[in-house]
Each structure stands twice: as C-alpha cells, then as structure tokens.
Amino acid sequence: MTDKLRGIFTPNLVPLDSRGEINEAELRRYVDWLIARGVHGLYPNGSTGEFTRFTVEERRRIIKIVCQQCDGRVPVLAGAAEANVRETIRACETYHEYGARAVAVVSPYYYRLSPESVYAYFREIALHSPIDVTLYNIPLFASPIDVPTIRRLAEFPRVIGIKDSSGDVTFMCRMIAAVRPIRPDFSFLTGWEAALVPMLVMGADGGTHATSGIVPELTRLIFDLTTSGRLSEAVPLQLRLIELFDAMITSADFPEGFRAAVELRGFNFGASRQPLSESQRIDREALQKVLRCILADFGVAEAPAEGCAPRTGNLQRDKVLQVTEAVLRELRERGMQ
Amino acid sequence: MTDKLRGIFTPNLVPLDSRGEINEAELRRYVDWLIARGVHGLYPNGSTGEFTRFTVEERRRIIKIVCQQCDGRVPVLAGAAEANVRETIRACETYHEYGARAVAVVSPYYYRLSPESVYAYFREIALHSPIDVTLYNIPLFASPIDVPTIRRLAEFPRVIGIKDSSGDVTFMCRMIAAVRPIRPDFSFLTGWEAALVPMLVMGADGGTHATSGIVPELTRLIFDLTTSGRLSEAVPLQLRLIELFDAMITSADFPEGFRAAVELRGFNFGASRQPLSESQRIDREALQKVLRCILADFGVAEAPAEGCAPRTGNLQRDKVLQVTEAVLRELRERGMQ
Amino acid sequence: MTDKLRGIFTPNLVPLDSRGEINEAELRRYVDWLIARGVHGLYPNGSTGEFTRFTVEERRRIIKIVCQQCDGRVPVLAGAAEANVRETIRACETYHEYGARAVAVVSPYYYRLSPESVYAYFREIALHSPIDVTLYNIPLFASPIDVPTIRRLAEFPRVIGIKDSSGDVTFMCRMIAAVRPIRPDFSFLTGWEAALVPMLVMGADGGTHATSGIVPELTRLIFDLTTSGRLSEAVPLQLRLIELFDAMITSADFPEGFRAAVELRGFNFGASRQPLSESQRIDREALQKVLRCILADFGVAEAPAEGCAPRTGNLQRDKVLQVTEAVLRELRERGMQ
Amino acid sequence: MTDKLRGIFTPNLVPLDSRGEINEAELRRYVDWLIARGVHGLYPNGSTGEFTRFTVEERRRIIKIVCQQCDGRVPVLAGAAEANVRETIRACETYHEYGARAVAVVSPYYYRLSPESVYAYFREIALHSPIDVTLYNIPLFASPIDVPTIRRLAEFPRVIGIKDSSGDVTFMCRMIAAVRPIRPDFSFLTGWEAALVPMLVMGADGGTHATSGIVPELTRLIFDLTTSGRLSEAVPLQLRLIELFDAMITSADFPEGFRAAVELRGFNFGASRQPLSESQRIDREALQKVLRCILADFGVAEAPAEGCAPRTGNLQRDKVLQVTEAVLRELRERGMQ
C-alpha cells in the first residue's frame, strides 16, 4: 500500500484482565467494534495505548493481535518507540512483517533533546526502517520536533507523515507551508481532537484521537462533514466533542478518564497498571456520571437514573471548565513545548 | 451605537518625532490610511501601541487624536488600563467623552493574579464604567482570564466582549460555548492573526491584529473571504500572513518588527522609546529586506534591488522558522498562561 | 555615602486610609518601628510596595515621606521604575534630591524583552542617572536580566549592585563569579528570604525581603547569626522563616498575605487598591489565625484564644505545603524566567 | 547494612565498545578509579547512566557488574525504574540479590502524573520491595514529587531517602522541615552539584552528581570541607565546580558533555547510543578544549598546547554564561516542575 494516510486513526487503549495481563479476546472485539463504527485506521502502542507501561514482548504482541484482527480492513499505524535507535529499528522490522501500514515513532523522551539530536535520531531510523515512518510530535511528553527539523526529515522518502499532538493550529499551518511544496504526499495528522475541525480546515489530513476510541461514530461524522464543506454542521459537534474531551481529561490522570469512558460503551478494560489511590477511585465514579450524560446526549448511552444537569451555563459545567484550564495549564507547565 | 463589535480592529502603533514626542500629524495621516484600506475599527493604546511606554496624559492625547480623526467613520476601541481600578474608571469616563465606542481593559499585569482577583478587578470596572467594556486577555504579558471568570463577567451588561491573544483555538471554542448561550451579543475578538481563519471558522467575530496595521488590505480580504465561506481562497492567504507575522515577530523584540514594517508602507514612525543597542539596529535592517520581499509579493511594495529568495523550502526560510519557534517558546515560557 | 549596600532592606508596604489614600502618619510610624527593630535600610516602591498601583505623583510622595522619616538613620533604596527611560531618569533625579542612597530599577515589564534590549534600557539609565543604580531582577514579573548582561552593566560605575528575586542560589553564584572580580564593591542582594541563609553563605551581601516588614527582629537575627558564622543557630530559624513566608504567600495573591500579617504587629494598613472578592475576604481571616500562631511562636504576638496546632507533621501543615508548591509552580508558570 | 545514606554517590556513565555494547572491562576499571578517588558510593542506572537507552537485560547486567566490582568497598544505590510497578518490583528483587545497598526509583515519566498517582505508584513499591527504596525526584524529566507526597511516603519504613534533582534549596529546606521530625534516619541527597555547598549547609546528607564521575577528588573535597565547617575554602571550589558543570551541560545534550569530559580522565567511553549529527561532533571537540583548561586548572589534566584563556571576565566565559542560562531556561521550559 502506498496511499497517503488520511482520516481518523484510533490510538486504542489495551484491555487488561483481572491479573493485569493483556485481554486478547476483548482487544479483538474492540477492534471489530471500532472498524464497524467507521474509524479509518488503528494506532496501537500510542500514548493512549500506554506503550511505556508494557514490556517489549507485550508491545509486539499488541501489534500482532491488532494487525491480525484488522486483517486489511483498515490500515494499522504501529507505535514503534523502543529504548534506543537499534531496538526501534528492530521493532520497525517486526511490525513490517506483521503487516502494519506504517510505524509511528515518538520523539526521544525522558531526556529533552535539542533539534539537532532529534534530527539525528530520526535520520537513523529513516535510513534503516523497512517500513514507512510517521514522526510523532508530542511536546507535552517528549522532545519537541520543530518545523525546520520536520522539513529536513521530509527529505527522506521513508518518512511519510507526522502526527502532531501540540494542539497549536498555527504550528500545523507552519508545518504544511514548509513541507507540502516539497512533499505533496506527506501526511499531516493532528493528535488534538479539541481542534479537529480547524486543523482539517487549514489542511490537515486527519487525526489520531483518543476520543475516537469512545465515540468513533462522532469523530467520523465530524471528519466527513468538515471535509465535505458542511462546516455549519461540524462546528457545533466540535464544541460538544471538546466538552466530552474536557470531562475525560480533567477527571483523572491521562488516559484514565478514557478507560472509564470506554467501559460505558460496553467493554471491560480492567484496571490500569498505574495504581490508583482511594480518592482517585471515587473521582472515577463521578466522571462516569458526567460521561453518561454526554454520551446519552449523543444517543449512544442511556442517561443515568438520577437525570442530567442542563447542558450550558450551569455551575457543574463551570467547575469542569475551571478544572480543565488548571489541568491544561499544569500539563503545559510540566512539559509542553 | 450598540452594534456588536465585529471585523478587524487595528491596534495602531504611535509615530514619534525626532524628540520622542507623539507625532500627531503622522498619526492622523496613518488613521486615514488605515480606514481607506478597509479596517473595521481602530484600537489605540493596545500592546502594539506600547501603552505602558506613554504617560497618563499622553495616553489620553492618543485616544483624543484617534477619536477626532476617525470622526465616526469607524468605531474606536480605546485601551484604558491605568495604575489601579479608580484610575482605570477615570480613563473610561474620559474616553466615553471623547466618543470611543468601547474600552478594552487588559487584565492586571506585573503581579500575576488569581482568577478570583481578576474577577474582582473587572467587576469594579463593569459596575462603574459609563462606556462598554471589552476584556483583554493576553496571558503572555498579563494575568490570564480563564473561561469561568469570563462567563461570570459576561453577566454584567457593560461587559460586551473579549479580546483574546492566547492564540489557542480550543480556548476560543470553550469561551464561545460557555458565553454565547447566555449572551448572544457578546463579541469574541482574537488577537492572534496567525490563526485568524480558524478562529473565524469556529465562531469568532473578528480580531485586533498588529499585522492589520501593516497590510490592512490583506487582513480585510482574509476576513471577507472567510466570513463569506470562500475558505479555499482564504487558507493560502492565511499561510502567507503567518510568514509575514513570523518575520516581524522574530526580527526584534515586539513590537519593533512592526515599526520597521510600517515604514515600508510610507510612514515615518521614528525611534521607539525603548532604546536599541547597536546589534539590534543591524538586525532591523536585515528585517526590512525580508519584509520588502513579502510585501512585494503581496503587491504593496517594490522588491529590493538585490532580488528576493524563492519563497519556500529555502534556507533563509528555514532559519526564520527555527527562530520563530524559539521565540514563541521563549514568549510562552516567559509568561504565557 | 559611598558604602557598599549591605544587610536587610525592607521593601515596605504602604498603609492606606479608608478612602484609599496614602496614610502618611501610619507610614511614618511604620518606618520608625522598622528602624527600631534593626532593619539596615528601607526600600519603598518595590514589588511589595505595590508601586504599579500608585500614580506617578503618589510614588514620589512615598519616597519623600520615607526619606524624610528615615532622616539619615538608615539608607533608602528608592524604587524608580517609570513608564519609559526618560521618565525613569526623571525619577532618579527627584529621588536624588530627596536624599535616597540609591535607586532600584526593575527590568522592563509587561513586554518581555531580550537581553540586548534589557542592556540598552539600563545603559541609558546608567549614563544619565545622578544617583547610584541597583538593577532589580524579578523574572516572575519582569524581563529577566541574565548574567552576561549584569556583567556588561557592571562596567558602568553608576551601577552599584543588583537585587535578585529569582530565588536560585546557583544563579547568585554565577553572578558573583562573573562580576566580583571586576567590581569588588558591587552589592548582591537577594529578594528571596526563603533562601537567605544559603545566599549569604555563598557570598550575597544582604537582601530585600517582604518578611522583614513583618518580623524585622528575625530577619536581622538570621543575618547576624549567618554572617558571624553561627550557622547551626541560623539554619533552624531559616526553616521557620520559610514556614512564615509560605503561609503569607499562599494565603492570597501577593502581597495581600503580607498586608494581613503586618496588621498583627499593630498597624492599620487598610484595604488594598486591588479589590478583593467575598471568598478572598474569608481566606484572609483564616490566614490571620495561622500567622498569629507562628508569630506567637516567635514571641512577637499572642496566640489566638482557640490555641494553635502542633508545629510539624500535622495535616494543617501538609495542606499549606501542598498549596505552597501549587502556588509557586503557578507563579513560575505564569512568568518566571 | 542499615547506615543512613551519606556522602557523594556517583551516577556513573556506562562505557560502550565500538559495536555499541557495554564495555565491561572499562566499566570495572572506571569503578575502581572512582572508589580510589574517594566517592562514597556508586549509583548505576541513573539519568547520567542513560538507563532508558538500555534494554531490561542490559540494565540488570550493569548493576551486576557494578555490585561485583564494588565488592562491598562502597555501597551501591541501584536505579530500578522499569516499565510498570510489577516490573520495577522485580528489578528491586534482582538488585537485592546482587547486593545493592538500596534502589533509587525515578517518579513515573513520559506521562506527567498528579501527586495522588505518584503516591499510589511509590506506595506499591514501598509495600513490596525487599530492598530499601530511595525516591528520585527529577521534575525536569519525570512527574514531580511534592513535599506532602514525600512526607506521606516517609511513613513507609522501606522508603529511606530521596534524591532530589530540582536544584531548589528552598525545596530542600521544606522537605527536611516536613520529614526529619518523623524520620531522623531519612536521607536527603541533592542531584544538583551546582548547589552542593548550600544544600549541605541547610542539612542535606550528600548528593548524586554527574560531575563526581569527572572530578571525584573535587566533589569529595567540597563535601569534606563543607561538612567540617570550612566554608571559606569550600565556597570558591563550589564556584569553580559550577563553571565546570556549566561547560559540560551547555556543550551538548545531557549527558553527552560528561561523556566527552570523562575521556579526558583517561577512559574510553565510546559513542552514545543517541546518534550525533555532524555539527554536534564539532561542538564536542570545542568542549574538550574548554574542559581541558578547567581540568588543568584543577591539576588533573594537562593544559592544551594552544593555551587557555584567562579565567574570568573574558568573552569566552560570557558566551558560556549566556548559553548556560538559555539552556537552563530551555530545560525548565521543557519539563521542569
């Protein structure tokens, strides 16, 4: 396959069983469910997929299961970041054999590297990977990849796109202006669903969104409406998607809010490998109530027995907004570019 | 006048004469020039207008001159931030007499205040100002105003809008979602021209952009194309506007790059009150060369004799991009929300 | 006087009367009280003194009153930042006439300027001021002054010292290493009392501390013990000073906690010009209870009737610590270098 | 052994051979060299040791080699962070068998977790580890551990200390004030050698410093002078240590500058697993020249044939200072608490 990556790729969470092991049956059922609801592709071993919390062997098993289960119905973009360049290239080789469409490689993390080092890292991978490579920029968690570095890396045919989770529309514009003239086939995916519509309007090709793992029908609808020019219908849906996103991201440490939400869609994802304290367990229940109301509003879940608060201008909402900004500020402060 | 604020308001720079005093004749000529090129309004004493570098008396004189010269042709949004609540309210009274349409009040600066203090500050102004008030959120330079605070302040009829210079499209969406249901007349202006098109798409009513003081024809054109649904024409212009914006903001400390640029349009703005060092003077010349090329490309200035580099994919551009990101990162680090 | 600035300078708050005007009688009484309790100097119109919330005329009046009242008993370091270089130089001239020992000029604020612009700004002042100048670095609120810029400015004889409020001991060491070899008379004052002992150990000459306006006896004692090598006595006092500092800085937006505290020493400072909301008024009362306990522990106030919680390892303390870190993180995020 | 951890622990780099594999012979030789020069302990698999760039099996081999080679001469503090709680506890078990004195566990990284999650993570480890645990706070690279969380974790007997790399002396004071009353045996180690003297003065028990791997004689000397009260001798050495530290940290991405420096002491550490670009290789040579001069000044290396610039007040030094601050600012911005 040599098509340009386009559309909504779901960075799927991984269900665990009661012993904390990968729940393969549930993962396969989840993949089928996502494909049936219109996602354009799968993106296992992303940040939402908690790739750092699995062992090397487990990461490979996750890709194998997802590739097998997709079975060519939709392309798989496989997260391939490992301990160092050599191990990452080995993962590229393995995922190529498994039938992934491409790999996504997060910029070096833990250490915060300079643009020159980020370039050197990806250059090695671009030269030696047998499978197409997508850069993954997530300044919140990893060394930022700046526009000139992206442009230099776009000179390697093996590098076919970027997933950017900065959420900065102007940054997306700068990338497109710098790279598209020399690589019209380069794919620009946004990882920030809270700005999906404006990103698509400015020329992005799609996105990889944790929210698409919760409401795949909706992210697909927003994509279709926006790319067919029906903006007046897409914009209100975007605002509601932000509301859902905010509720999930502020309720607990990422991606715990998304794990709570996916269970409302009928899946059993088990407990995270990151332990929770007592107070966090209580927060999680409160989130589920809020989420159920939003999902009910979208028609994909039943409203809770005790009813839902009106949607705008109420205190509940204001509290969520204040927490949202505090959390985003906190996130930004803790590591964002 | 009680119309909703809408369109592009120019935060005009103030020309100075050789003694460093306000050059009234040149300011009046500049106001006429801007109006003739299609700006929807003027916004004196904004950050671009270097309001902190003038005395109380000078700030009043600037508003008086601009209001007189506009003479009702376009509305004036007068920057009214003073030393404390009482002085700010006095400025509101004066600017009301001068015939301004509304005032814009920047959030408390120097000290970084909590949302509760920001609320208390604007509440006093909202209760006592005789003229409509626009909140001014510029987290880069002043205490941030968060969405719940904006929503609480929108309950005061005197508060009619917000100018937001965060550049964050998702933040704009959150504001609109929180406030529009209770105040359909509330005006949302973005101060970040680098995201003008996506902001308008998501529902913003216009903007106050330093760039509109340099290329008023272009910001007007982008506004008209976007609001009439001609996005495929607006998007490429937006990308070029970012290029111009980046060249000006990275060449020198804000707003010095804009001062250098406006001279290319035929005005004499004199030297800033913020002294420049020798090396900075050299940088300014280099900027003028780059700017001349971009302006020439837009057809509003002649290309320099030595010619211009091709527009995309060249080293010059890459260097600007790298500097841009470093500068924006720096700005964000130095005080952004 | 040409002595090196040395010791603890109090950045005094300004008492206001019921109409919000400067309470001259109380200010004079406060100056006498501070001098009687051992402060080495006064520092009116600092950040603690809320210089931005007074008019130009009021700022001059404050310096005049303090200089008169000190009457040569201790030196006055007068805050002299005004709207632009010319106005700042005028303030230098005026404060020279009033008999101040030196002026302190905060780095340009609102706009965040580059080192080159910061240099150009102070260079003008250094060349034209008739009175000795102290640089004031407070990266939390104003453009940071980096070590190479400090070193370049130390070449002007008029620049005699720096007040640094970064709180970074390593930064203090870098400044001393860079400047002392060429200017042994240069004075290094720290604005961060939470690190007073380690700063003095590494070679600082003293400090300007808001806390010295509340417990002048203690900051003087810590200074004397540390400079005479009695570290084992100074260190426990430093830890308690941090506790007091944290209680004041986390209770309300700076410097409101210090205003509440000074009233416990028997002064009437009135309400701030920055309005408070209802919830903030309640917080202020809670603070006064905590402060009274700490002051009682130091023997300078009576314990509240309801008694005080034990001093270490209790929940109350933990809560203060958590708030402290959140506040400091917030401050840092909002504008620190 | 149940002694309190005290003194300087070297976070050793790992030498690699020409194929990029662990160079066991050189590692053993390096361990002997460090012990002979007075380090109090070894700290393999720290950030300086690039633990994230090795595989699980390699990390175990590194600990095994270091424990064997130390052979009880000095205690080993083994870095034990793995993919998740379960794997980390397994590493604790293994390193216990190898004879390590304690393990150091970095706070969860990549994801930036809240204090509550950080607590839950360490609580699991504290309950199940068979070996003493040291918390490792490095807000630059991992989720910050705040003081209340440290205090809560200090209630577990298995948690015996903290290594803090924040560089904030006031934070060190707050930790000591909160924890020492309930756990006098708790060990406070600073990871920031640029503030070693002030940290020791305020009560820290020692440190884990990358610089001690380059000049172990010097960090030992500074420790001995400070803890025996000879501050007037320790302070000038601290200033010189900052100069060395700055030269290494600003020359290349951490810890590349330290790798270049250790080769000047007669070791062959090979190329990093993080690839370098051409321009970075040139920078590295320039660094070696600067380092050689500083080491020559300390008497542990020969001055370069072309001579050294004078030590203070020269342009070369100024440039390093400016870069230092930019780098530190950058680091802070990219992830510091």
Image: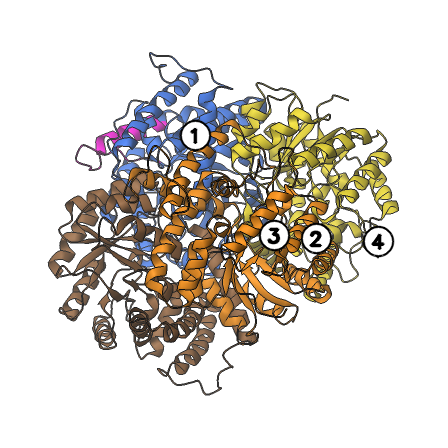
Chain colours: A orange, B brown, C blue, D yellow
Depth check, mark 1 against mark 4: the one in front is 4
Task: Report how far apart the C-alphas of labels 2 and 1 lie in the structure.
Answer: 38 Å
> Compared with residue D284, is residue C198 higher up or lower down, i.e. above or below?
above
Q: Nearer the viewer, residue C130 or C294?
A: C294
Q: Is residue C32 magenta?
A: yes
Residue at point 27% right, 46% down? B151
* Disc marking residue C33: none
Depth check, mark 1 against mark 3: the one in front is 3
Q: Would you say residue A131 is visible in this rendering? A: yes
* Residue wearing tag 1: C245
Depth check, mark 2 against mark 4: the one in front is 4
Task: Report how far apart the C-alphas of labels 3 and 2 lie in the structure.
Answer: 36 Å
Q: Nearer the viewer, residue C142 or B297?
A: B297
Magenta range is: C12-35
Q: Residues within 10 Å of mark 2 (few under 14, many from 20)?
A: many
* Disc marking residue A44: 3
The three-letter amino acid code for the residue at tag 1 is Phe
Q: Residue furthest right?
A: D25
**Residue B195: x and y, percent?**
39, 64
> Compared with residue A156, is residue D55 higher up or lower down, i.e. above or below?
above
Q: Residues within 10 Å of mark 4 (few under 14, many from 20)?
A: some
Of mark 2 and mark 4, the one earlier in the sequence is 4
